[in-house]
Image (cartoon, rainbow, N blue to C red):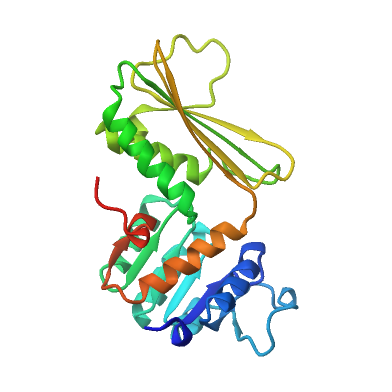
């Protein structure tokens, strides 16, 4: 489907990322189908005649693809509404429970779902490189640590992106992240456990997002670093995913698929 005829809806259109998504949808030449907003009074400044709905079902009915960066609590309802209308879903919400994750997987049996903790091309490549390094560098010789820093308003730690990078390392090592994750060290913790994947979260100022992956042995250190300077990078990537998703059959995809990266 040409971008000029693709109808893209935005969940949470009045939010900070939602407004960036509006601009990126327009820049891509797609049709802004509308959005959802909890507070109708907060939608000032949107393009004239932009439909704003209070529920996902109404937005899904007028959209080919919906981009969703809202809250984990909305995921089950959104999954059901989008699947019912056959509307593709670009999902950037993180921190999902097992039930919410199951709802996403169930929806992916009926619609194309592109799910990612971070839609920037740079982070997608960092994840792929972290996976390759996790597979290549022995866990008993190379300690893996992930350090992230975000603005002072961020409420979750580690960030969803940091955890996604950790998942990539764990996949490369053939382990489950929850079995080897080591976060928030404090006090007398004892020596570092061999094979652990460590996380450190820093908060301050208005930093958009910084992530660093370190593989350290007794003899060398390899570091991967990604810094986001503007939240627009997430909106640009999400719109790219939306343009790609509409042409795909039902299934669960990631940004690796959108970028056309080969399987590892």
Would you say residue 173 is visible in this rendering?
A: yes
Q: How many marks?
A: 0
Q: Residue furthest bottom?
A: 49
Residue at 45%, 87% in the rendered image = 5
User: On screen, 174 above or below 251?
Assistant: above
Report the front residue among 166 and 28.
Answer: 28
Residue at 73%, 73% in the rendered image = 42
**Quadrant in the rendering for residue 132:** top left
Q: Quadrant of the C terminus?
A: top left
Residue 83 lies, in percent from the top left, at 35, 75
**Quadrant in the rendering for residue 144:** top left
Left or right of residue 37, residue 221 in this image = left
Report the front residue among 211 and 58.
Answer: 211
Residue 8 lies, in percent from the top left, at 49, 79
Residue 162 lies, in percent from the top left, at 48, 40
Left or right of residue 157, residue 75 in this image = left
User: On screen, 89 above or below 258?
Assistant: below
Would you say residue 70 is visible in this rendering?
A: no
Residue at 64%, 54% in the rendered image = 230
Left or right of residue 202, residue 94 in this image = left
Residue at 30%, 67% in the rendered image = 108
User: On screen, 159 above or below 224?
Assistant: below
Residue 158 lies, in percent from the top left, at 53, 38
**Quadrant in the rendering for residue 174:** top left
Q: Quadrant of the N terminus?
A: bottom left
Report the front residue among 138 and 116.
Answer: 138
């Amino acid at each position: 489907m040409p971008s000029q005829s693709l109808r893209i809806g935005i969940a949470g259109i009045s939010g900070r990322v939602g407004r960036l998504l509006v601009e990126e949808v327009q820049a891509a030449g797609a049709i802004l189908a509308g959005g959802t907003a909890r507070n109708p009074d907060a939608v000032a400044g949107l393009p004239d005649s932009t439909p704003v709905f209070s529920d996902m079902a109404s937005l899904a009915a007028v959209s080919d693809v919906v981009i969703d960066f809202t809250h984990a609590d909305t995921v089950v309802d959104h999954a059901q509404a989008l699947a019912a209308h056959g509307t593709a879903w670009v999902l950037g919400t993180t921190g999902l429970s097992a039930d919410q994750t199951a709802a996403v997987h169930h929806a992916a049996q009926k619609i194309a779902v592109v799910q990612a903790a971070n839609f920037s091309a740079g982070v997608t490549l960092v994840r792929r490189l972290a996976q390759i390094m996790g597979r290549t560098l022995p866990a008993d010789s190379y300690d893996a640590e992930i350090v992230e820093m975000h603005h002072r308003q961020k409420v979750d730690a580690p960030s969803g992106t940091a955890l996604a990078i950790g998942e990539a390392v764990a996949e490369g090592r053939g382990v489950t992240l929850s079995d080897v994750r080591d976060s928030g060290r404090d006090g007398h913790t004892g020596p570092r456990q061999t094979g652990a994947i460590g996380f450190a979260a820093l908060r301050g100022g208005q930093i958009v997002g910084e992530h660093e992956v370190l593989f350290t042995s007794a003899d060398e250190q390899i570091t991967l670093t990604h810094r986001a300077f503007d939240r627009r990078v997430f909106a640009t990537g999400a719109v790219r995913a939306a343009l790609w998703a509409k042409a795909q059959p039902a299934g669960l995809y990631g940004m690796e698929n959108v970028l056309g990266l080969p399987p590892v």
